[in-house]
Image: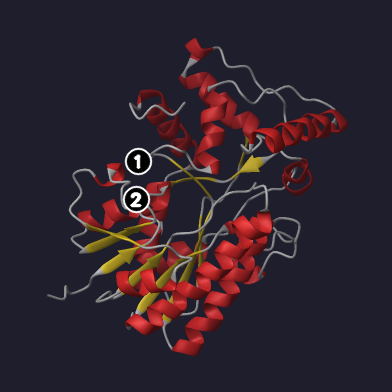
Amino acid sequence: MAQKNLALVTGANGHLGNNLVRLLINKGVPVRASVRNIKNKEPFAGLDCEVVQADITDKQSLINALQGVETFYAVGAAFKLWAKDPKKEIYDVNLGGTKNTIEAAAEAGVKRIVYVSSIAALNYSKLPTKESNGYNPDRRDMYYNSKNDGEKLAFELAKKHNIELVVVLPSAMIGSEAFAPLNVSYNIVNAILKKEIPVETNITLNWIDVKDVAEGCYLAATKGRNGERYILANEKCTSIKDTTKIAQELFPELKIKLPTAVPKPILFLVAWLMEIGSKISGKAPLLTTKEITMFSGLQQDFDISKARTELGFNPKSSTQAVKEAMKYLRESENGFK
C-alpha cells in the first residue's frame, strides 16, 4: 500500500543521512532509508523506517528505492578529499551518481528533490560568501569539482525532467549521532582530542551541527523555492587553533597543546611526507600539500540570511556545536579510535 508523503533518504547510514532519517521520523514523516550495504543495520537500531539497498552508481537500484516516494533527499555521495585515483573514485562517482539520481527520480515520478551539495560549490572571491556569488572557480580538487559540476548538472536535469529541485550547501558537519568511520570534518575534531594536529596550518572551518543541517534539509523540502540554493552553515569560521582552545577549556586533563606555528616550507614538507606515507598505506593523509595551497588562510564566512529568512534556518553557534561534538566523542561508546 502506498504511503502518503513517503520520503527517501539516500546515504542513510552516513553522518547527515542518518540524522536526517531520525529527524523525519520524529516529525512523523514516513521514511525509506537507502544504503549501499544492506547488512549495515547498526545506524538504524530502534528506528521506525524501511531500509532498502540502493547505490548512486546503479540507476535501477535507485528507481526501485524511489517507488511511491514523494520527496527525495539526495544525500548519498562520495565525501572524501583524498583517493588513490581521485577522478575515478570521487569525481566520476559523484557526477554519474547525480545523473542517475535525477533520472531515476524522473522515472519513478518523484515530485521534489532536496539535493545535498556543499560549500565547496561556492565562490569565495567576495566575503561573506553567499549563494548568488556563483560557483567555485578553483579547479584544483576533484571533490570540489564534483560538487560544482554535480550541482549544475542536477539543476539542468531537473529542469529537463520537470522535477522540483532545491539545493542545500552544508559546511563542516559535526556532532551526534555519528558512527565509525567519522566523516572528514568530524575526524578533525577527533584528531584535536587525540593530539594529532601538532602544527598550525592556518586552515579554518565553518563548524555546523549535523542536526541543524538535517533540519535545514527538511525546511528546504517544505519551504524552499524550486531552483534555489541555500547555504546551511554558520556566519563565521573557526581556526583549528581556536577549535583546539575549546578542547583545552573543556578537557584540561587531556593537556592538549596548541598547534605550533612553523614556516610554510616546513608545513609543505610535513604534508608531502604524509602523502608519501598514504600512497604506501592506502589511508588518507591528515594533511596534503593541496589542502595547504587551497585552504590555508581561506576565510569560510557566509551570509546565511537567505536560509534564515526563507527557510527559518536557525543553527546553534559554531562554538556550541564544537563543544557538544567534543563531549559526544569523549562520552561515546561507539569507540571512535
Residue 128 seen in render: no
- Kindly check if marks 2 and 1 are in contact, taking CB atoms under 8 A apart as contact: yes
Q: Camera-side residue: 106 or 325?
A: 106
The quarter of the displayed image where residue 110 is located: bottom left
Which numbered disc covers residue 177?
A: 1
In the picture as drawn, the residue positioned furthest to the left comes out as: 1
Residue 18: numbered disc = 2
Q: Amino acid at mark 1?
A: Glu
Q: Residues within 10 Å of mark 2 (few under 14, many from 20)?
A: many
Instruction: Left or right? Give the position of 332 relative to 27.
Output: right
The secondary structure type at the circle numbered 2 is helix
Horizontal and vertical percent for residue 75?
43, 60
Location of residue 222 in the rendering, given as x and y in whole percent from the top left corner: 32, 71
Above or below for 160 versus 219: below
Dot 1: few (<14), some (14–19), or many (≥20) neighbours within 10 Å?
Answer: some
Residue that appears at 41% across and 81% down: 164
Judged from the image, the secondary structure of the residue bearing numbered disc 1 is loop
Mark 2: amino acid: Asn
Residue 249 pos. (x, y %): 50, 20
Which residue shows up at 52% across the image and 59% down it? 304
At 28% from the left and 46% from the top, the residue drawn is: 41
Residue at image point 56% right, 63% down: 94
Instruction: Give above or below for 72 relative to 138.
Output: below
Q: Viewer-proximal residue, 58 or 176? A: 58
Of the numbered discs 2 and 1, the one sitting upstream in the chain is 2
Left or right of 26 in this view: 248: right
Residue 312 circle label: none
* Frontmost residue, 158 versus 305: 158
Distance from Cα at disc 2 to Cα at disc 1: 8 Å
Evaluate whether residue 83 shows in this view.
Answer: yes
Image x and y of residue 66, in percent: 31, 73
